[in-house]
Image (cartoon, grey):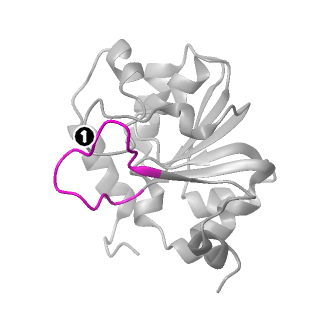
Amino acid sequence: MSSIADPAGYWDRYGRGVPDETPEDALTNAFGWCQYDGHGPGDELLGDPLTTLDLGPGRGNAVAALATKGVVATGVDLSPVQVDAARSRWAHLPNAHFEQADVLDFLTTTDQRRDAIYSIWGAAWFTDPTALLPAVLQRLTPAAGWCSPTQPTFPAPPPAHSACGQRATPDRRPRSVRRLAAGA
């Protein structure tokens, strides 16, 4: 969907401009499903996965946050700069893995299934959903879920009890997800 001539170069430039934060802050703020800092929700949207895949992890903070909880977490990013930064910062976490690839190429060439696949302001916003969602659904374990933020429909922070994201599970996938996954 992007019309950028060099998407990897674009994200490399973006990655070079991301300010550093302490590892503690990076882990605390890892799951920003909406644009309002500290609003939540957190990784509870993913359920209790043993394995996860982050599509477009940037510096890898969410992957690292899950890895510190014992989840085998992998992030796939198009940007070599972002992947190098994630690997450098989180190399000490044995459950955190980072791959540099186009997410569609990665999803369609791997046989590995995950308990949760998510995208926090990453590939879900910049990849054709009619190609992405069927590929994602093929890589989920039977009881797994897909989670991605949705565009909020309000101009100011919502009440603390509301969420700026949605989770799709096999038995409760929104109609639009089912329709896209079926290729319709």
Magenta run includes residue 153: yes
Secondary structure mostly taken by the magenta-highlighted segment of the chain: loop
Residue 176: image location, x then y, percent? 57, 74
Q: Does 43 appear above or below 35?
A: above
Seen as rendered, the residue at the extreme bottom is 184
Q: Quadrant of the C terminus?
A: bottom right
Q: Which residue is mark 1?
A: 36
The answer to whether residue 11 is seen in the rendering is: yes
Q: Which residues are magenta?
A: 150-165
Residue drawn 44% across the image and 44% down it: 80
Residue drawn 29% across the image and 29% down it: 38
The answer to whether residue 78 is seen in the rendering is: no
Residue drawn 32% across the image and 72% down it: 5
Residue drawn 65% across the image and 38% down it: 52
Q: Does 146 appear above or below 182?
A: above
Question: Which amino acid, mark 1?
Answer: Tyr
The residue lying toward the viewer, choosing from 16 and 63, is 63
The residue lying toward the viewer, choosing from 159 and 44, is 159
Is label 1 in a helix, a strand or a loop?
Answer: loop
Residue 92: image location, x then y, percent? 55, 13
Magenta run includes residue 21: no
Q: Dot 1 surroundings within 10 Å: few (below 14), some, or many (20 or more)?
A: few
Q: Quadrant of the N terminus?
A: bottom left
Q: Does 112 appear above or below 176?
A: above
Residue 46: image location, x then y, percent? 60, 39
Residue 6: image location, x then y, percent? 34, 65
The residue lying toward the viewer, choosing from 69 and 168, is 168
